[in-house]
Image (spheres, grey):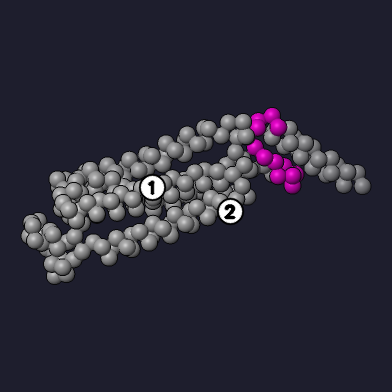
């Protein structure tokens, strides 16, 4: 009997200490299964998480952009493979036979379809998934997915605009524009996956 009361008092004491820690710090939420504590969004100041996540997302875009800038040094690029064959005879590269009639338009449709799928899934997750007011990782995951949506929309708009301009001037796809399109596309993809990685980490910590 004495042993049972001792265990009960010890458990209650642990819960009380955990509750006090949560109230004093403001950065933790107590799971009232006696002493289990999990991370949560800082209710007083979420701006730190927003700033850190935004900087990380922009750094990801910048690193991808720099990679394409360093590895592609031509003055301008062609959307359609047939224009490379016609105007520059392949620029010294060994092109497939299909390049003589190759056009970018079929690939453009597929790129836009993939971007639409990622944007739709990310938007649905932001709208209906999880509660960012309770879990820090959910909050961060939704910020990353929002960044993926922004990059995806910009990618679609820019590639459609430039391809339309390309029909009037084959030199419109400059090195800077080419790197920007590539960086937006890959940032959309990578940030989409990183957002769900953060989400999965939250599920693993609960």
Q: Residue visible at 73% across and 32% down?
A: 20
- Left or right: where 149 falls relative to 40: left
The residue where tag 1 is placed is 151
Distance from Cα at disc 2 to Cα at disc 1: 21 Å
Near-viewer residue (52 or 1): 52
Is 165 placed above or below 106 here?
Answer: above
Residue 122 versus residue 51 in the image, above or below: below
Residue neighbourhood size for the residue with mark 2, other residues' Cα within 10 Å, grouped as few (<14), some (14–19), many (≥20)? few
In the image, which residues are magenta? 23-35
Residue 146 appears at what percent x and percent y? 47, 46
What element does badge 2 sit on?
Answer: helix
Q: Could you tell me which residue is drawn at 67 percent across and 40 percent down?
A: 29
x and y percentages locating residue 64 in the rendered image = 31, 45
Q: Is residue 64 shown in magenta? A: no
Q: Quadrant of residue 139?
A: top right
Residue lying at 63% horizontally and 43% vertically, measured from the top left: 134
Q: Between disc 2 and disc 1, whose residue precedes?
A: 2
Around disc 1, counting alpha carbons within 10 Å, would you say few (fewer than 14), some (14 to 19), or many (20 or more)? Answer: many
Residue 143 marker: none
Figure quadrant of residue 119: bottom left
**Observer-nearest of 17 and 7:** 17
Residue carrying label 2: 128
């Amino acid at each position: 009997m004495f042993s049972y009361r001792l265990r009960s008092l010890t458990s209650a004491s642990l819960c009380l200490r955990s509750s006090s820690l949560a109230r004093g710090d403001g950065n933790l939420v107590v799971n009232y299964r006696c002493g289990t504590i999990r991370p949560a969004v800082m209710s007083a100041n979420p701006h730190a998480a927003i700033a850190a996540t935004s900087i990380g997302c922009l750094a990801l875009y910048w690193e991808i952009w720099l990679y394409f800038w360093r590895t592609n040094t031509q003055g301008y690029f062609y959307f359609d493979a047939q224009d490379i064959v016609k105007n520059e005879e392949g620029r010294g590269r060994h092109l497939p036979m299909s390049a003589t009639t190759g056009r970018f338009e079929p690939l453009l449709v597929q790129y836009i379809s993939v971007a639409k799928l990622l944007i739709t899934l990310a938007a649905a997750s932001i709208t209906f998934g999880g509660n960012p007011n309770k879990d820090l990782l959910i909050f961060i995951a939704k910020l990353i997915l929002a960044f993926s949506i922004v990059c995806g929309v910009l990618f679609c708009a820019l590639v459609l605009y430039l391809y339309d301009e390309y029909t009037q001037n084959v030199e419109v796809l400059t090195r800077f524009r080419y790197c920007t399109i590539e960086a937006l596309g890959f940032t959309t993809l990578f940030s989409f996956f990183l957002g769900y990685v953060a989400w999965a980490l939250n599920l693993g910590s609960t």
